[in-house]
Image: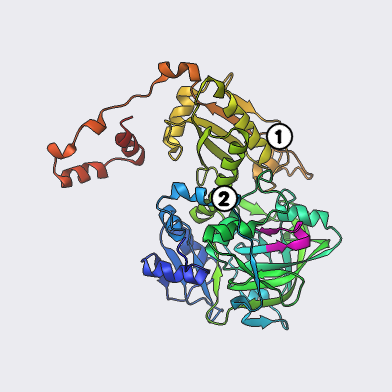
Amino acid sequence: MTSHLTSLRDTLAFLEKEGEVLAVGGEVSPIYEISGIVKSLDNGPVLLFENIKGYPGVRDIAGVFSRQQRLAKIFGVDDFKKVKLKWLDAMRHPLPPRIIQEAPCQEVVVTENIDVPATLPILKHTDRDGARVLGGGNPLLMGPHFRGGAEISFKRMSFRGKDWGTLLAAPGTHLGGMLVQQRGQRVPIAINIGTPPAVLVTAAGGGIHTVLPHGCDELAIAGAVQGFPVEVVKAKTVEAYALAQAEWVIEGYVDTTQRVWETEEAEKLGKDGVAPLFPEWPGYLGRAHRTWRFEVTAITHRRDRPIFYSPLTHSMEHDLMHSVLTEACFFELAERLIPGLTVDVHIPPYIGVSTSVVYQVKKRTRADEGFQRNILQSAMSSSIGLRLAIAVDEDVDIYSCDDLMWALVTRVDPATDIIISGGGKRTGLMPIENYDPVGEPLGKPSLLHGGMGIDATVPFEARWAMERTHYPVNKVDLGRWFTPEQIAGARSLQGDYARSLAETGR
C-alpha cells in the first residue's frame, strides 16, 4: 500500500492527483439527490460533494472503492485479483493497533445540545425509505467487550431522535453476538465515520467466524495491510476507543435493556420486517426491525471540512469492499482443510456478495478427488447465510460468469454433483428467508432454507475425455496480416467473454 494513505482524506488527495475524483460543486441534498447521483455513476469516478444543503463546511464522499483497478491502486497492488492475498497475509501476520493520546478525530468535541441528524448529512436513499439511514458508520468494539480483541464492521443506524437511534447487529455477526452475551448492560462503543482505507475494507468483509473468531483483532489485520499500526484514541465520554484518523466519531452506549423500532411506521404496525426502511445489499428494499437502542453521549470530528462517507449498500463499491476480506477468509478456510488444493477464490459482485463463493481448485493426484466437496461443505457450514458454493477446475475463469455457466452446464451431473446443506441460521436481510409462500412474515426466527454446493470439477480420472478446446492463438501474429488500428478496431467489437476466450484460445 502507498505509505502516505493514513486516512480517508489522504486517500482523497491521492486519488485527486490520479484524476479519479469528480467534484460536485453545486448544492446537493442528502434527501434522494446524493444517492441518485452516486447510483447513476456507479462503477465510475469517486464523487466528492462539496456543497451539501443544510450542512455548511461538511463534505461527502462516495464511490471510493467502486472500481477494481482503483481499489487495487489504493493498496499498491497491480491486479485486483491479488488484493485478497494482501488480506490473507495480513490475517497470518497481524499488526496490533497503537493507542495515542491526541487524535485528529477529536479536534472538535460536542457534548451539549447534541443533534445527530442536524450535524451529519445522513442520506435518505429512495422515496420508499422509512427513515434517513446511516450506512457508512464503523462501530468499534475493543478490549473486554470483545474478548480482548477488536471488532470493526458496518452496521445500519436510524436516528429517530436528536441523541438516540437504533443499531442493527444480527446475532450471527461479531457485534451482534457480543451484544447478546452482554444483554442487560449499556455497552460503550464508538461509531467511526470516514476511516482509513484499510479499515474500511476490513470492516466491510469477514463473517466467517471459524477463521476470524470472536476475540480476534480485526484492526491488527488492517494494520498489517497498510504496513503500520492503526491508531486508536480513548473516547471522550465513554469507556471505549475511537479510530484516531476518522473524520467523525459518534460516542455512546448500546442499551441492551431496550429494543426499539427502526421507524415510526414499524412501531405503529408493531410488526417486524414489514415497514420499508432503505435498500439493502441483496438488492431488495430492506424492512424495518426492532433492535438495540443507541444513546449518543458525544460527537467528535475534524475541524477542517470533515468528510462524511456514504457508500450505497447495493452498489459496486459495497460489493468490491465486502469481497476482499471475505475471499481471503474462504481461501484460508480451504487451506486449513486441504493445503495447496485451492488455486483461487472469487465472490461474483452484485449476484454473490454474502451469499455465494466460487473455488478454483487443481487436483494434483487421484488422492485429491473428493476434497473439493469437503471444501464446499465447510464453506456452507462456516458462513451464515451462504446459499451457493461452487468448485471448478483451474481451466475455468472464475471471474467470468459466462465461463462459470459453461462449466455448470458441461461438467455437473445433477444426480451426484449437487450438495444440499441442511440449513442453519438465516441472515435476516434476505427476503426469501423471512416470508412464507404467500408473502406473510414468518413472525419468528426461521432457518435458512439450505445452501447448495455444486461440484463442477472434472473427475480426475476423466480429464483425458474432457480436454478443453485450445485454438492456436499463441502461434499466430496478427500483425503479419493487420495493422495495429485494424486489430484494435476488431477487438473493440468483441464482448468481454469473447475477448477472454480469444486471449486463451478456448
Residue 245 drawn in magenta: no
Q: Residues within 10 Å of mark 1 (few under 14, many from 20)?
A: some
Residue 141 drawn in magenta: yes
Residue 115 x %, y % = 68, 78
Specify the amino acid type for callout 1: Gly
Q: Element type at marker 2?
A: helix
Residue 30 x %, y % = 55, 70
Q: Is residue 40 above or below residue 115?
A: above
Residue 493 x %, y % = 26, 42
Point 42% across, 76% down: residue: 25
Q: Element type at marker 1?
A: loop
- The residue pinned by badge 2 equals 325
Q: Can residue 292 be seen in this view?
A: no
- The residue pinned by badge 1 equals 423
Asked which quadrant contains residue 252, the reply is bottom right
Quadrant placement of the C terminus: top left
Question: In the figure, is residue 342 to the left or right of 169?
Answer: left
